[in-house]
Image: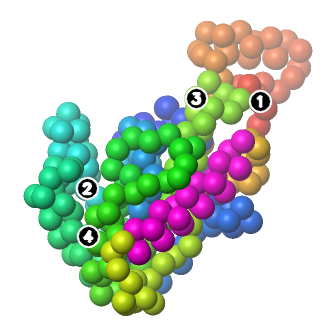
Amino acid sequence: MFYVRRYLRRHFHAVRMLKEGGGGGVPDLRGEPVLIYTNHPGWWDPLIFLFVGEVLYPGRMSYGPIDARALGKYRFLERIGFIGIEPGTWRGSARFLRMARAALRRSDVIFWTTAQGEFADPRDRPVEIRPGVGHAVAAASGGVVVPMAVEYPFWSERHPEALVAFGPVLRPTDAPGRSADEWTAILARELEGAQDRLAVAARRREPAAFRTLLAGRVGVGLVYDGVRRVRAWFRGERFDAAHGGSDS
């Protein structure tokens, strides 16, 4: 996690979570097993999952499936909790369901899954998810399921923001007779709602609407920022490397 934090700090201006007033906030898991399902906007998703899980739920371990072909290219992901499956195959579907069912019996883990299965623009509508997630939830005997929206917009700095927003906590036991297809439709709808709320907040570019989980790099570069720093010193001004000024 030291490496993950350092890596995110180098490549993002900040990692932020939408606050309660924007329809976000931190889900109360109450020591229950949890499956967090998300959209899939980019390569960064697994590292964002690990970081968010550690910050918000430090007592839990994070696990999740990943395309076996991608895992072959980034073997370090296997060491930090991601398990390869073969998407679009019977074997891959069966392994995903075994993993999800096992995770939903344990209160010491977070099971993360990119429900769309492949990269998708965060503004694509309607949001469609793979049916495997609905089957896993329909078969669950307990635990909670939570949607989380993710996107990586550029605001005023040369590095992008990493933004996340949670949807409502769903309990499979509240609707024991619900079919896998019904769950798939509900999960897609709730994820789309979280993505819509995050999209509105992202367009407004208001850091105050978010809780900053990690502050990353600001400024243009070492040489140019050095010149700006010296110029500010001669003028008796406080140097601020951020292009848009300080934020929270």
CA gap, disc 1 and disc 2: 38 Å
| Closer mark to the observer between disc 3 and disc 4 | 4
Label the magenta part by its dominant secondary structure. Answer: helix
Tell me the kind of residue under disc 4: Ala
> Pointer 2: what residue?
65
- Regarding mark 3 in the picture, which secondary structure is present there? loop
Sequence-first disc among 3 and 2: 2
Say whether residue 78 is visible.
no
> Pointer 3: what residue?
159
Sequence-first disc among 3 and 1: 3
Tell me the kind of residue under disc 3: His
Asked if residue 33 is positioned above or below residue 235 in the image, the reply reads below
Q: Residue at x 32, y 63 (%)?
A: 131
Q: Is residue 220 left or right of residue 203?
A: left
Tell me the kind of residue under disc 1: Gly
Q: Where does the magenta region start and end?
A: 182-203
> Pointer 1: what residue?
244
Asked if residue 11 is positioned above or below residue 186 in the image, the reply reads above
> Pointer 4: what residue?
100
CA gap, disc 2 and disc 4: 9 Å
Q: Quadrant of residue 101?
A: bottom left
